[in-house]
Amino acid sequence: MKTDSTGLPSVQQLNGTFEIANPCAACDVRTRAVCAALNNAELTELSEHSRHKELSAGDTVFFEGDPAEAYYVVMDGALKLYKLLADGRRQITGFLFKGDFVGLAFHTDHTFTAEALKGSKLCQLPKQRFETVADHSPQLGHRLLTLASAGIASAQEQMLLLGRKTAAERLASFLLWLSTVQGREAAKPLDRISVPMSRADMGDYLGLTVETVSRTVTKFKTSGLIRLCDHNEIEICDRETLSSIADGEELD
Amino acid sequence: MKTDSTGLPSVQQLNGTFEIANPCAACDVRTRAVCAALNNAELTELSEHSRHKELSAGDTVFFEGDPAEAYYVVMDGALKLYKLLADGRRQITGFLFKGDFVGLAFHTDHTFTAEALKGSKLCQLPKQRFETVADHSPQLGHRLLTLASAGIASAQEQMLLLGRKTAAERLASFLLWLSTVQGREAAKPLDRISVPMSRADMGDYLGLTVETVSRTVTKFKTSGLIRLCDHNEIEICDRETLSSIADGEELD
DNA sequence: CGTCGCATTGACTCTATTCAATCCGGGTGG
DNA sequence: CCACCCGGATTGAATAGAGTCAATGCGACG
């Protein structure tokens, strides 16, 4: 098949009811990402202008303050989003994984930096074109609103964590969340989770220092709540207790 | 004019270009609230099913966990939104004022409690009907998305505050934010701000205790950054310094 | 095998919390 | 009118939980 400079198959024509050949057809986050809300015509329209981006660990997608020029879908890998204070203090506001959408929460300029945690693949959608489609597609509009709504709800959950939870409660909440996220494909929480971020990243997400994260992990490990497996893998041994810690229930 | 049981003028007919008599026409948040994105037909459609709610200080609009049945526009007064932990620890996730919209961030159930800070008036829009209008109106859809996007951005700002700022930085940020919010109508930040919430509420919003809030207010007062006027009024005396504190810039 | 980056552990400090005692202003009832 | 009360705000003293600083451990990689 003939391909253009981006390696995407080119679209020949656009007529009628049969399936249009376009790169999205083969995309394995297609059914889970925002794209699921698009019909074929819209998909084709967008895919013609989409670009795939390959990132290595530490690569930055965009910086806080940069003009916003595109939306992104995470096709594979993991990103962290963060904000900085003048003296370098950092708050990670979210981690994104396969299927997640980057683009809510900015207007003309980005309000946070987006950086790859590890090798990742993104699908870049030009801002203007995406917004036009969004304005004309009730399905997509609805989907975006649902996503935004979920985003606000989880942001509020995170405020509760940052404002009112202890170190142990924060870590427990985080591990359970990771477990849920990584179980998305399987549609059930995983007991064996991979932790693609450093202790420093965990700290900057949980409003703690590296040392406190490390100490708390150790505490969980010695009390048998979790087990550290090979590099970057954690096994949840006692989900029950972890849950009650996460929810701040008094323990006797 | 004939009115129904809710005290709203009834709508006689709905034809053509001239203005339809409906209660929203006289609403003074009409141009600033979500409603600004509605055309006359949509406005009429919604207003026919809207209900106004009067609240006294401490009244609850809905509780976390309640099934979500409506959206609300704050016509006057002030609300606080909060989440609780099992043992009573509380995190206020936002304060809403005249013109603000309540309804993003919930799906079937409310994820937070909404309570009046003082006497307030709300416009209640039935969930189903509002969503139908939203799905059919690109203007409203766009507006909601913009609101949601702004909501996420400010939630992230709050995460930075809760996760990484000191007590003084938090209070300074809060006061400047209040100043901006109360200057919305005047389109410029106010130096004389009214503080409708208690110290406890401020603490629960900023992730601090009442005592720490009080001490920090006193510190700002004695350093001449602010002045306490009559009950619940604070004057910002040194916006410059307050800003640099809020942004975490090192002071010499 | 040595180095580098991240993680862990230890000792000490400090900020914000906790607990407790006033203070203050507004409302009430004698 | 004034004493009393009550809830919120302030202040003080002691404490604790997380932060800071510093040393060491560990694993990947050249």
Image (spheres, coloured by chain):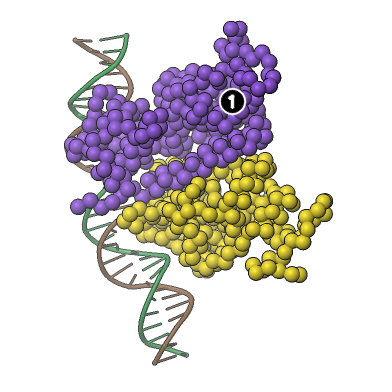
Chain colours: A purple, B yellow, C brown, D green
Q: Quadrant of residue B217?
A: bottom left
Left or right of residue A194, residue B162 in this image: right
Q: Is residue A178 above or below residue B83?
A: above
Image x and y of residue D3, in percent: 37, 87
User: A39 left or right of B88?
Assistant: right
Q: Is residue A137 above or below residue A15?
A: below
Q: Residue at x 41, y 25 (%)?
A: A117
Q: Nearer the viewer, residue A39 or A70?
A: A39
Q: Chain of mark 1?
A: A
Measured as percent of width and height from the top left, residue A19 is found at 61, 19
In this image, A202 relative to A69: left or right? left
The amino acid type, in three-letter code, at marker 1 is Leu
Which residue position holds label 1?
A125
Residue found farthest to the right: B17
Which quadrant of the figure contains the N terminus of chain B? bottom right
Residue that extends furthest to the top in the rendered view of this protein: A2
The residue located at (43%, 33%) in the rendering is A95
The reply to whether residue B218 is in sight is no
Residue at 43% x, 61% y is B199
Residue at screen point 47% across, 66% down: B58
The quadrant of the picture occupied by the C terminus of chain B is: top left
Which residue appears farthest toward the front when viewing the image? A17
The answer to whether residue A159 shows anywhere in this view is yes
